[in-house]
Image (cartoon, grey):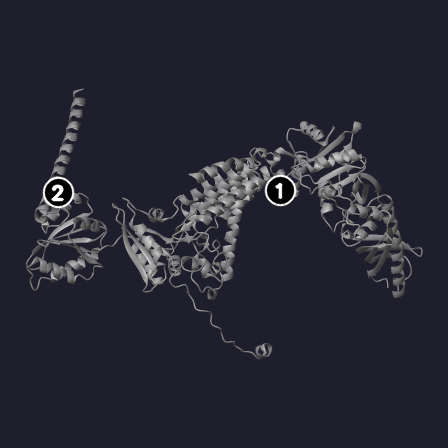
Amino acid sequence: MRRYWRILALLPLVIMLTGCWTNRPVEERSLVLAMGFGPAPHGRVAVTVQVPTRTGLTSLTGTSGSGGSQSAQVYSLSAEGSTPGSALSRIQGQVQTDVYLGQIQLLVFSRNLTRRQFLLIERFLTRLAPMDKTAFVIATPSIRQFFHTLTAAGQIPALVLASGFKCRQCATVTYNQTQWDLEMSIPTPGSSLWMPYVIPIPTGFQTDRILVYRGLQPVWALSPRDTILLGYLLGRTGKGYLSLTVDGERLGVRMIQASPHVSAKVVNGRLVMRFNLALSGTLDTWTGQTLTPTSVNHLDAAIDRQVAAETLRVMKRLQADGAIPGNNWLAPFIWRQEPGWRNAATWEAQYHKAGLIVHTEFHFNDVGDSM
Amino acid sequence: MNQQRNGTTSSQEAVIANTLKDLIESSKYLSQHLEGLSADLAATGNLDLYSGSLTAAYNRLKSTLGRSPDIVIRKLTLGASEIPAMVAFVDGQISDSILDRDALMLGELATPAITDPSTLFSALESHFLAVGNLKTSKKWSEIVPFMMLGMTVLAIEGVAKVMLLDTTKFPARSVGQDQAEPSIKGPQEAFTEVLLTQMNQLRRRLPSQSLRFEPFTVGTDTHTQVLVAYLADVANPDIVWAVKTRLGAIQRASVQTSNEIGEYLTDRRWTIFPQLRLTDRPDLVARNLDQGKVAILTANDPTAMLLPNTLIDFYQTTQDYSTPFWDGSLMRVVRLAGLIIGLYLMPSYIALTSSNTDLLPIKLLLTITGARQGIPFPPVVEVIIMWLIIEILREAANRLPQQLATTIGTVGAVVVGTAIVKAGLVDSLMIIIVTLTALGLFTVPAIEMASTWRWLFWIFVGAAWLFGVYGLVLITVVTVVHVTSLENFGVPYLSPFGPIRISDLSDSWIRLPFPQLQRRPITLRTLLPHQAEPDPVHPVLDLHRAQTRFRS
């Protein structure tokens, strides 16, 4: 009898632990694929969500939708509020179905968000239960423009971008950042916040740049070339490309693989960081004379010099802007170096006045038939 | 008016006349019965004992059984001295040829003339050859049931016991192919309803001197013959004792099928997991007897029961042993995959499309959402609709002749499936899921286990709808705990997985080659644990020069 009482006592627990109260068929939900945050007047926050239309959904299954292929794949809903939560509840008021946040693929942050707004949004996202932390984060100049841009192939934009970020071998440099990375970066000394900087263009989205933050304030949107160079240094190269001028002739190298190694040393109380970068690639373009083993060595050395100089320029600019080149980038040095520098904050302070040395070593994997 | 009145009067008279006729007839039988009883009572002082009076015997049999047209009670004289005797049997349950041959033999007893009935009785007892079995009895409580089971009663005037001649021959079908558990390779025959044939089929496969058939009679009305079969030098005596004890304790008026007995024998009566393996295949029974199990054969039912069983026993078929071990193992793994798909695919679909939408990959979720656009029912109602259709089709196919069953299957799969999607009642993904689920659940070789999974399937569907993935995990845990707690004649139901029995794993979800299967199931605690000697090392044959060079 006591056994049955125990089972009976467990029953409410069993029922109350479940999510059956929010049980709703998927077709009765508005699946939010992308959520954007932008500034609004009076310190408020504007929230925009992107939801696939019925046409967008049926186009995936091959069954024809009511509007045919000409109809929009997605629609956007926007609202402003003093907090992201209040804006979201206003969005919920605009539709009859449940605005479902459990499948967000992309979180879009406006470059123009203030520090306070950014923090407000991040705190909101940290507590947003149905959403997991695997959504990719990006920055963009204009939220409105971003959510009104369509891809050239007529696909759902959030899915196209998220697929691109997931594929390590698809992009030149894999700079994907997830909400989890963002949450980890914000409170951690020795880390800087940075995100892919996605710019809407008439044919879709340009995704070859990153935006670096100092604290929660954006400081520098790197050019595509600087982004690639930084990618080499952080070991995030997928299939890099470099275009250089050597002796007045054009040189193109593709399929660049980079193997970086960073070492730190304290010399006379000052931190000196040395970046050793081993690069290899395939000769793609060379407008000069026919290559010989000697001239290839000459090209190797020329590439070494140019890449080293340019990479050093990028690193110094980041240093000057008060940014650190990656998430938790300084963490590996903390326990290896000076006994007095046992915390990330000290390392961050030292890094900003550190001496930087970049050494590159390039060699060609393949020069084709040009030799 | 008068004519009508006259008609009514004549019909009433006919009814009264019939009633009177019945009454007279009944009185006649009652008087006959009382005469028989009083004669036996007067001679023996016991109503159950036969007095030796043919008249009394005739009266008792005629008054109790004689009203049925298939009961034959015939008076005759035996030998030159013409000693009165009586033969009684149930027409249709005995072999005419045996009786006729024995009747001829009775005629040969004329010389030299025997005048003493007791001597004649003894002479007959030692002369009957054609009958399979002969016994004598003086108790009416034995005589009548044996006669009903096909024995011929021979009574001689003045001898206070009767001879029961086993002239039984039932109308029976010939040994046919097994339909319930078909096999592509290996033996094909099935048991018949006749117990003797069942025994013969087993004897042919297990001509071991230790094969025992212990008879029991179950059912106070039906007197159903039941045999407990086992190998005396292999089966655990405790298991055999437990089976016999439980079988002997059954008190029931009628037993028509083996399952009626089986439900008395199980340890846990209310569990949905079957504890008895029901099979029509003599080869399967023979194999299991050799492994140390006990079989129960029931008269008039071709289905034998095997016990004790573990969960894995319901997934093993004869075909697994008739094909190379890679094939056998693959089939078992496919059955396991079928079980997992059948049990979890549809509940997972419900859970992931209703409660735990965030667990699906986005592209799959969008595909499912796209397919579900415009469907008027939630997934759980779709499942109920589709599964009801499947069950109805299944039942219809079972009830119809084979040729029509195929048509029903085609109609169900093609016409209903296509039509229901076109009508927009069910989405196209659901058709795929239902088909896979049905196929998965139909891979179970034992039909008694199939219904278990079908019950569990519904529990899973309910849990998935109410509690999502959490519900699936919860019911899985409850099921595993329940199965772990089950025991069957002292054998853990989940063995060899819980408790783990390493050597038994070699014939579980995979089957190792026969030379590797050297031990009988440890979980059965058999008297002879080894069933094979270690595999001998074969001498290497070098038939070609290259082989010699290569090996050196």
Would you name the residue on which mark 1 appears?
B359
- Above or below residue B168? Residue A202 is above
Pair 1/2: label in front: 1
Q: Quadrant of the C terminus of chain B?
A: bottom right
As helix, strand or loop, the secondary structure at mark 2 comes to: helix
Instruction: Determine the residue positioned at 18% across, 45% down.
Output: B65
Q: Which image quarter: residue A126?
A: top right
Q: Is residue B296 visible?
A: yes
- Identity, as a three-letter code, of the amino acid under mark 2: His
Label 1 crowd (10 A; few <14 / some 14-19 / many >=20): some
- Above or below residue A291? Residue B546 is below
Chain under disc 1: B
As helix, strand or loop, the secondary structure at mark 1 comes to: helix
Residue B127 point in image, percent of width and height: 15, 62
Whether labels 1 and 2 share one chain:
yes
Residue in the foreground of this view, choosing between B107 and B339: B339
Q: Quadrant of the N terminus of chain B?
A: top left
Q: Residue furthest top?
A: B1
Residue A133 point in image, percent of width and height: 69, 42
Q: Is residue B90 visible?
A: no
Would you name the residue on which mark 2 appears?
B33
- Identity, as a three-letter code, of the amino acid under mark 1: Leu
Q: Residue furthest front?
A: A340
